[in-house]
Amino acid sequence: MGHSLRAAALLAFVVLSVLVSLLITSLKQFGSGSTRFFNATNPEELRRGLDVQLRERRKEILPLLLPHADDDDEKNGVLEEVQHSSDSALDLSLWNEVTLGTGKAHRDQMGCESLVDVRAVEVLGSGYTKLVVKANVAGGQAVALKMVNEQGVDMRKCLKEFRDAEGCRELVSYKLQKEMLLLQRLRHPNVIKLDGKALQSQADFPSSTETKVAVILEQGTPLQMIQLLQTPWEDRFRVCLDLVRLLHFLSRSPLGSVGLLDFQPRQFVTVSGQLKLTDLDDVSAGELACRTHADCTLKFPHRNFTVLCSTQGVCDGLNEKRNIYNAYSLVFSTYLLPHQAPPGLTHLVDHIMNTTGELKADINQTLEAFEHILLLYKLGLHLDNLHPSALRDYTVMRDMSTSGNGEYRCWPSYSQQGCVLSVHSAREAAHICNSHSQCSSFTLTGQKTWTGHHLASFRSSFGHLVPDSASEVYVKKSRVPQPPLPPPPPSS
């Protein structure tokens, strides 16, 4: 019990220390920290109004819990019970899994004990509802902690309206708890990994009625579009491919078809170069209900699209099409996909741009097109037009690398100090070197990219060779000097 109390207390301390640091740094969106209340008309009426909103939030979360039942008969029984119960009599065993953490624990996930000796490092982001903090847990592992932003807009609005700090904290925490459940249900390589959760409830502190929640996530790097545009095409293609793989999963997830309603780069991070969805606040599980085809219109700033209203009364495929077009307009078409694409692949990239921009292809066809490009790129089949004699002008020295000055810069490069590019083979590297006027040699290093391509370093000159069993140096052959012309014969 003492261990649990210490962990819960530390969790509360982390929340407090982060809020203090935010106030010190004067983040304007949090305001002055003081709250003005409207004059309460009747405390009982205010509480009834808050209870109505609490029940609505509970209704939003319960459908995410139902499929956790052990078998179909139990699922159907719970569904029937929920459908025929009143708002105040919703299934408590399911609800306790969220509010008290009484559900089955995952052995590989962190809990309150992981927050003992936790050290908050920096604030990664803040919004109306949540605060995201980078922290180091026991063992030095870096994680992201998501917590309720008690100085955020949602909390302040609730306090103004209901004047109930504990009830408002519970209401605001629903978004965090809903996101935790979505992360549990939507497990995928391109969705941020849920490392665990920490709950401080009345079971830990019987004298307290407060419930504090922290969601523990793997640490990622925010997606920055401007920085991404400066990276090599291969890495930009990976982001686009990961996004399409994610959308393919969401089109047939365990929750049905899922739509991303707030489709922005800030919803994503990268972990070791892999794109991951990290903010699930505004996802919609299930298709929109409809009565006519007109109810199924997708409206974008420059285009409108309409899908059919099915006989079941839902807009069939609406989420998928919304996701595809948002991927096109907010990611692909921002030069991320077509810019500097390999010449042998540009026609395939253009085809993807056309079909996604006009919604002429579904997510299956779009993923197939991306995977086809990846296969061609990995195998180097897009390089068939390169002249096979490109390497004849080079002398190769195996198990060697170069040292000394002689680097030059190119763009985009994997190194800011020199010209380091991804190549499929020495033949492609020779073709690149021949196209650079200052290049006299290149080295195939032992490093490889995510596609299995070699990293090649291009130089204008080098000081000397050094042994390196993982590298090969290719040097342009010196031109053979022409012998001087013989002197003219003496005149007679």
Image (spheres, helix red, strand yellow):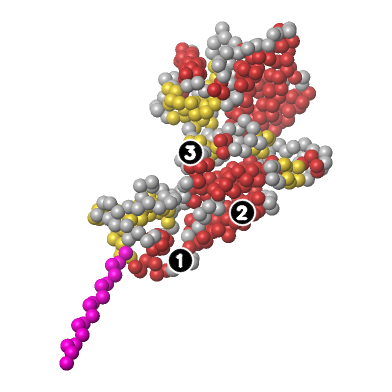
Residue 316 position in % (x across, y down): 75, 43
Residue at position x 41%, y 62% in the image: 435
SS of the residue under disc 2: helix
Residue 73 position in % (x across, y down): 71, 31
Q: Would you name the residue on which mark 2 appears?
A: 352
Q: Is residue 297 above or below residue 93?
A: below
Between marks 1 and 3 in the image, the one whose residue lies nearer the viewer: 1
Amino acid type of the residue tagged 1 in the rendering? Leu
Quick check: can you spot residue 191? Answer: no
For label 1, count other residues whose C-alpha is less than 10 Å away and answer few (under 14), some (14-19) or many (20+).
few
SS of the residue under disc 1: loop
The mark found on residue 386 in the picture is 1
Q: Are marks 2 and 1 in contact (CB under 8 Å)?
A: no
201 left or right, relative to 300:
left
Residue at position x 42%, y 69% in the image: 388
Q: Which residues are magenta?
A: 476-492
191 left or right, relative to 468:
right
SS of the residue under disc 3: strand
Q: How many marks?
A: 3
- Earlier sequence position, callout 2 versus callout 3: 3
In magenta stretch: residue 481: yes
The Cα atoms of the two marked residues, 2 and 3, are separated by 26 Å
Between marks 2 and 3 in the image, the one whose residue lies nearer the viewer: 2
Residue 127 position in % (x across, y down): 57, 26
Quick check: can you spot residue 226? Answer: yes
The mark found on residue 271 in the picture is 3
The Cα atoms of the two marked residues, 2 and 1, are separated by 25 Å
Q: Residue furthest front?
A: 492
